[in-house]
Amino acid sequence: MKTLPYIFEESILFENSDFILINKPPFISTLEDRNDPVNILGLTRIYEPNAQVCHRLDKDTSGVLAIARNPVAYRHLSMQFENRDVNKVYHAVVDGIHSFVDQLVDIPIEKQNDGTARLSRKGKAAQTYFSTLKTYKNHSLLECRPVTGRMHQIRVHLSFLKSPITGDELYGGKQFFVSSVKRGFNLKKLSEERPLLKRMALHAFTLQFDLLNGEKIRVEAPYPKDFQALIKQLSENQR
């Protein structure tokens, strides 16, 4: 069995003296979680004791995550996030067939006391652009480009567009079952079909920002196995 530090090292996409960029796996919190002792920050500090996470990904969201190795690097990237100079691209599989071309959702989002978020004029400004990358029988693969970084922003905005993320039951998404697309799919007797993806189908695909020397870096995170399996099933059973 792999040790935690080894698992962390396997996820590194890029590193220099200031930053570590990893491909965060799903089902692990970015910061400390009272329900789970294992988190990205804790694992990182085994590898780099002074590490600070520069932004967050939801526990069930996979993809590229930036971590600073020192306070100067942390401030440098934090200012870019604050000034909206960081380019973030997410990929999401959503329910339904949609043809978005730079579709902008510009609606404020308000954080709720129960840990969810909703659209509200009382909320903070939130803008996201959506474009369709590919359509399947009953689903679509979208590129999501958030301008701001509000809680559950992509999830809430996609729900507003009536294209909730597959598996995101909190905001109207449905679980994906292979039987829904594969003809002749048979289960073993007395067994119950489980969803192919045990989370929402959202992946932080790329992150682009300026390093301390002024050089621009763009890092791409490959899909994890569960996201790959979903795309494979959708592609093989398009019609």
Image: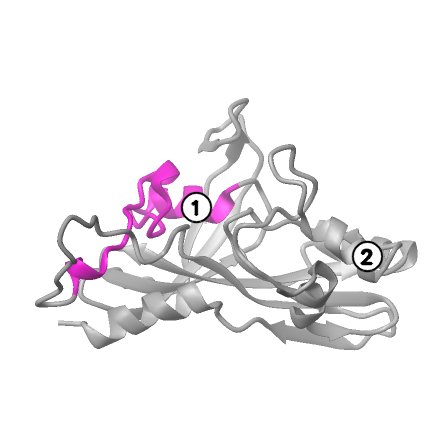
The mark that comes first in sequence, 2 or 1, is 2
Disc 2 element? helix
| Residue at image location 13% in from the left, 64% down from the top | 185
- Residue 224's place in the image compared with 71, above or below, is below
Report if the CB atoms under discs 2 and 1 are less than 8 Å apart.
no
- Residue 221's place in the image compared with 146, above or below, is below
The quadrant of the rendering that contains the C terminus is bottom left
Whether residue 142 is in magenta: the answer is: no
Disc 1 element? helix
Where residue 131 sits: x, y (%)? 39, 64
Dot 1, crowdedness within 10 Å: few (<14), some or many (≥20)? Answer: many
The residue lying toward the viewer, choosing from 102 and 217, is: 217
Regarding residue 133, the answer to whether it shows in the image is no
Determine whether, in the image, residue 6 is placed left or right of residue 153: right
- Residue 172's place in the image compared with 167, above or below, is above
Determine whether, in the image, residue 105 is placed left or right of residue 1: left
Question: Magenta residues?
Answer: 152-181
The nearer-to-camera label among 2 and 1 is 2
Disc number at residue 155? 1
| Residue at image location 72% in from the left, 69% down from the top | 9
Where residue 102 sits: x, y (%)? 41, 63
Give amino acid for label 1.
Answer: Arg
Which of the 4 quarters of the picture holds residue 70? bottom right
Where residue 160 sits: x, y (%)? 35, 42
Regarding residue 161, the answer to whether it shows in the image is yes
Q: Residue furthest left?
A: 184
Give amino acid for label 2.
Answer: Ile
Q: Circle 2 sits on which residue? A: 46
Disc number at residue 122? none
Dot 2, crowdedness within 10 Å: few (<14), some or many (≥20)? Answer: few
Whether residue 157 is in magenta: the answer is: yes
